[in-house]
Image: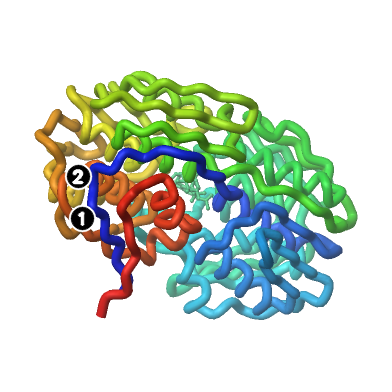
Amino acid sequence: MDKIIIHGQNRLSGTVRCHGAKNSALPLLAACLAAGDPCRLYNCPRLADVDTSLDILQHLGCLAVLDDGTAFVDPTNACYREIPDALMRRMRSSIIFLGAMLARFGRAELSLPGGCELGARPVDLHLSALQRMGVHVEEQHGNIRCRCDRLYGASIPLEFPSVGATENIMIAAASAEGETVIRNAAREPEIVDLGNFLNACGAKISGCGESTIVISGVRRLGGCGHTVIPDRIEAATYLAAAAVTAGEVTLTHVCPEHLIPVLSALEKAGCRLENSADTIRITAPQRLGPVGYIRTMPYPGFPTDAQAIIMAAACTAEGTSVFVENIFDGRMKHVGELCRLGARITTEGRMAVVEQSQNLTGAPVTACDLRGAAALIIAGLAARGVTEVSGLCHLDRGYEALDRNLRSLGADIMRVSAE
Ligand code: UD1
């Protein structure tokens, strides 16, 4: 069990290159299964979740490798197999293979993601949308078994703009018979990226990034080469790390347009931000001010994935900030651990009030989820003394070389193997 050990309060300065987005790479890899010819994904991050996606693709008979930032997937010899529970459980977003398996094989059997680190994560919106497209769904003992002779285009109004459901429908509908219209679709940049990838494979999808997406099914998808968009949450992590250390950091290979609510929160806290088309430079004040009132919302609102990260920054501020988590019901688990570092946070349901504390001080803490792990590292960078972060399996799902990059910016951070 590895640990990260941080001696806090070093000022960060320098330049970091951000990786491709985890939340784009995963649906793109799943979509490769539905493609008819080999695909290359450039700027693909090396993460535990990406490795799991490659393992699932290999299990299904695809050639799937990641080398030097390029994922190569040849789906031509794919053959149907059940995905073993052990493989499915390694990654909560494995549900994203559902649409691709139905498009490719006309059937899929998966274990349900079930409850997780972020609270209940139902898949009812995915399943009812697929039912509208002609899929027969059976749920039994935590397994879902789906079957269809053919996928048919359908009108699909989503009750909530679910990112994963929108992605599953897009992948399934790309080669379905007829037209699919998704209303109240998710508008995240990762949806636009998936739409661009599928269109490069020959799909006919319009409206990605808007609330209504129209997909005219084509007979067959081909393959393509596609560059994964930058990871906006990784970028938010480095920005928060710079913010809590009075740092001056430049991020390259980012898309500032995808980060507007996060940049605006950091500006409110007193940071200076200078953007170009694909770089962000942050200059932080000696002491942050409060970030104000943050409510997580579907894109283009404040991202739930940045909630814990910006809360860690708010813990070091002079003044009070309020966070309301509107997307997931169990996404406050980092609060108790931040309090171990001296933060003053009270929660009431989905709301957290972060009050001014004296300096944070180092302590042993344990991450309970991916972005919570990043939040503890950010708080550790600001804290006086030594912070030891365990639970790194969560961190490895979504960050490539976070400790190495922070060290290159001047942080005193080491990853050690613990007995
Ligand atoms: C994706 C992201 C995750 C991010 C989230 C919200 C990936 C791999 N993960 O997750 O990092 O935090 O979007 O931006 O891209 N819901 C239902 N029924 C469903 C589906 C969802 O009730 O069938 C609910 C969920 O429980 C949750 C909310 O809708 O409360 C949002 O979920 P969704 O947008 O689907 O998130 P994911 O796609 O799982």
Q: Which image quadrant for residue 230?
A: top right
Res 130 visible: no
Q: Position of residue 120 (x, y in %)?
A: 36, 54
Question: Relative to 132, does residue 286 appear above or below in the rendering?
Answer: above
Q: Identify the residue at horizontal 16%, vertical 45% (top origin).
A: 384
Res 59 visible: yes
In the picture, measured across the screen, residue 291 lies left or right of residue 161, that is left
In the picture, measured across the screen, residue 66 lies left or right of residue 103, that is left
Q: Nearer the viewer, residue 148 or 220?
A: 220
Verify CB contact (< 8 Å) between mark 1 and mark 2. yes
Q: Identify the residue at horizontal 49%, vertical 55% (top origin).
A: 123
In the picture, measured across the screen, residue 38 lies left or right of residue 391, that is right
Q: Which residue is mark 2?
A: 383
Q: Which residue is mark 1?
A: 387
* Pointer 2 local density, CA inside 10 Å: few below 14, some 14–19, many at least 20: many
* Pointer 1 local density, CA inside 10 Å: few below 14, some 14–19, many at least 20: many
